[in-house]
Image (spheres, helix red, strand yellow):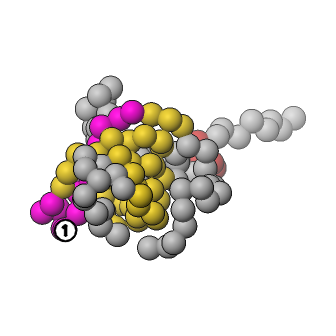
């Protein structure tokens, strides 16, 4: 875990949000509910249920998607914790994202020969 603070510059712009999620750790044997306060492509600011809880250094963040019913899972690293707020960096790509289609396959060849 790095010693960076919540004021450190970020690589991705965070959007304010109020979404419920679940922090899962200890090989899936432990979990608790959190509230996502800010969310970006690279991480999130989480609010714990109590200031007395200490978030683990690494964990999975499960974010439900009410539109599809399929949750999104991110493997995270705790970057900082102040009281009941935790900064999390996504250290793996989104695990439920469909694989990217290579540009050579997805874009048709629009050149024509005369």
Q: Which of 59/50 is in front?
A: 50
Judged from this view, the residue extending furthest toward the left is 29
Q: Secondary structure at mark 1?
A: loop
Q: Which of 3/73 is in front?
A: 3
In-image side of 84 versus 12 (left or right): left
Q: Is residue 95 visible?
A: no
43 in magenta: no
Q: Which of 56/51 is in front?
A: 51
27 in magenta: yes
Secondary structure that dominates the magenta span: strand
- Range shown magenta: 18-30
Q: Which residue does the image show at 34% across and 69% down from the upper left? A: 57
The picture places residue 11, in percent across and down from the top left corner, at: 63, 55
Instruction: Establish if 114 lies above or below 76.
Output: above
The picture places residue 114, in percent across and down from the top left corner, at: 87, 35
The quarter of the image holding the N terminus is: bottom left
Judged from this view, the residue extending furthest toward the top is 67
The picture places residue 98, in percent across and down from the top left corner, at: 41, 46
Q: Which residue does the image show at 15% across and 60% down from the upper left? A: 30
Picture quadrant of residue 36: top left
Q: Is residue 21 visible?
A: yes
Give the number of callouts: 1
Instruction: Establish if 101 lies above or below 20.
Output: below
In-image side of 108 versus 102 (left or right): right
Picture quadrant of residue 106: top right
Within 10 Å of disc 1 (Cα), the crowding (few <14, some 14-19, many 20+) is few
Q: Which residue does the image show at 64% across and 40% down from the upper left? A: 107
What residue would you read off at disc 1? 26
């Amino acid at each position: 875990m790095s010693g960076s603070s919540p004021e450190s510059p970020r690589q991705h712009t965070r959007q304010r949000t109020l979404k419920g999620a679940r922090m899962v750790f200890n090989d899936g044997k432990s979990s608790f509910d959190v509230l996502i306060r800010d969310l970006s492509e690279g991480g999130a600011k989480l609010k714990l249920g109590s200031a007395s809880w200490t978030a683990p250094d690494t964990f999975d963040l499960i974010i439900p998607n009410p539109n599809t019913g399929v949750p999104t899972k991110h493997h995270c690293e705790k970057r900082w914790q102040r009281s009941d707020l935790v900064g999390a960096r996504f250290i793996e790509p989104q695990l439920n994202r469909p694989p990217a289609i290579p540009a050579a396959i997805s874009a048709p060849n629009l050149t024509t020969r005369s």
